[in-house]
Amino acid sequence: MKAETKRVTVTLPPTIYEELERLAAKNGHKVPGYVRWLIWRHLDGQDISLPLFPPGEE
């Protein structure tokens, strides 16, 4: 079963996008996946009472 998701659109200056491209490529990823990883990493360090992943999807 696919989890329900929402989309987010972000506008960045070209220099920041290029840096994200460089960092993503360094780890074999594209910018969208790298940004998702950055967000998850940030959220993982926060005091959030709801589970970030539905049961069985970690």
Image (tube, rainbow, N blue to C red):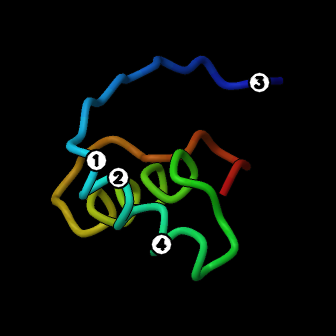
Amino acid type indicated by mark 3: Lys
Residue at (34, 52) in percent of width and height = 17
Q: Secondary structure at mark 3?
A: loop
Amino acid type indicated by mark 4: Arg
Label 3 vs label 2: CA separation? 29 Å
For marks 2 and 4 on the same chain, the one whose residue lies earlier in the sequence: 2
Q: Is residue 51 left or right of residue 27?
A: left
Task: Name the residue beneath numbered marker 3.
Answer: 2
Q: Nearer the viewer, residue 27 or 12?
A: 12
Task: Name the residue beneath numbered marker 1.
Answer: 14
Is there a contact, CB below 8 Å, between mark 2 and mark 4? no
Amino acid type indicated by mark 2: Tyr
| Picture coordinates of residue 55, whole percent (x, y) | 64, 44
Is there a contact, CB below 8 Å, between mark 2 and mark 1? yes
Residue at (40, 56) in percent of width and height = 40
Disc tally is 4
Is there a contact, CB below 8 Å, between mark 4 and mark 1? no
Residue at (29, 30) in percent of width and height = 10
Q: Quadrant of residue 29?
A: bottom right
Query: Which class describes the residues within 10 Å of circle 3: few (<14), some (14-19), or many (20+)?
Result: few
Query: Which class describes the residues within 10 Å of circle 1: few (<14), some (14-19), or many (20+)?
Result: few
Q: Quadrant of the N terminus?
A: top right
Task: Name the residue beneath numbered marker 2.
Answer: 17
Q: Secondary structure at mark 1?
A: helix
In the rendered image, the vertical position of residue 24 relative to residue 3, given as above or below: below
Task: Name the residue beneath numbered marker 4.
Answer: 22
Q: Nearer the viewer, residue 29 or 12?
A: 12
Tell us which disc is closer to us: 2 or 1: 1
Amino acid type indicated by mark 1: Pro
Q: Quadrant of the C terminus?
A: bottom right
Residue at (33, 41) in percent of width and height = 50
Tell us which disc is closer to us: 3 or 1: 1
